[in-house]
Amino acid sequence: MDPVRIIEVKRSIYESNDREAEKLRQELKERGIFLLNLMSSPGSGKTTTLKQVIARMKDEYRIGVMEADIDSDIDARAIADTGVRAIQLHTGGMCHLDAGMTRQGLEELTAAEVDFAVLENVGNLVCPAEFDTGATKNAMILSVPEGHDKPLKYPLMFSVCDAVLINKTDVMPYFDFDLEQCRKNIALRNPKAEVFPVCAKTGEGIEAFTAWLKKEIDSNYAGVSGHTFLLQGNEFIIKEIEET
């Protein structure tokens, strides 16, 4: 008998999180709550893009946003300025959110009867893709300055996303960025991913993405009437931002 016992800790953590995520996803479905997990590297334009989306959708849906960061509440305050409910999640140094953390945030967020929730995940192309948050759909933003080769370098991130927004198209003439090659690279990782070239600064291309979102949200609501949500735990900081 081998005297050394090897425990696959990482695998165990993933499997446990996957079970919790699937349970959360089913609960959200039953209650008619659509959760979008928005991921990207830092500086790609998540918050600016989200503000454009909110402007086009807040009259049709009750929107709430969870801003996840290692520290600060800058992004949550920017979102609160749009008039929707926003809370800041501090991860205590962790570079991602998992299903359990998402549950805790939703406890605060859905108290306002939100039916479209957005999790703006920590800026990172690696860790957030490894942990299923229980979201209904995953989306990520790739900005033009990052390069069209990122789908090849970060395969998991692109493989788990239902939609990919290629942001900052207004500066494409100034960078060695091949849009069609980028589309091909994304398709290599995930042929089912919807690709939306956008400019969050001007709003160009945002309508196409919001049309896709509305279709997905309405499909999620089919056959569901009313919703409540009760969650437990408070293991990391939840800071509510006042609406303005």
Image (spheres, rainbow, N blue to C red):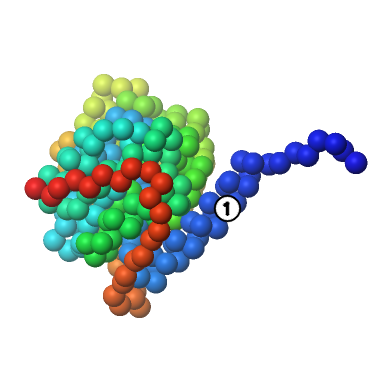
Q: Left or right: where does residue 107 sit relative to residue 159?
A: left
| Residue for badge 1 | 16
User: From this viewpoint, is residue 174 visible?
Assistant: yes
User: Residue at (90%, 41%) from the top-left corner?
Assistant: 1
220 relative to 225, above or below? above
The kind of residue on which mark 1 rests is Ser
The mark tally for this picture is 1
The location of residue 149, given as percent across then percent down, is 45, 29
Quarter of the figure with residue 122: top left
User: Residue at (13%, 49%) from the top-left corner?
Assistant: 243
The location of residue 167, given as percent across then percent down, is 28, 36
Quarter of the figure with residue 110: bottom left
- Mark 1 Cα-neighbour bin, 10 Å: few <14, some 14–19, many ≥20: few
Front in this rendered view, residue 185 or 71: 71
User: Residue at (48%, 50%) from the top-left corner?
Assistant: 132
30 relative to 196, above or below? below
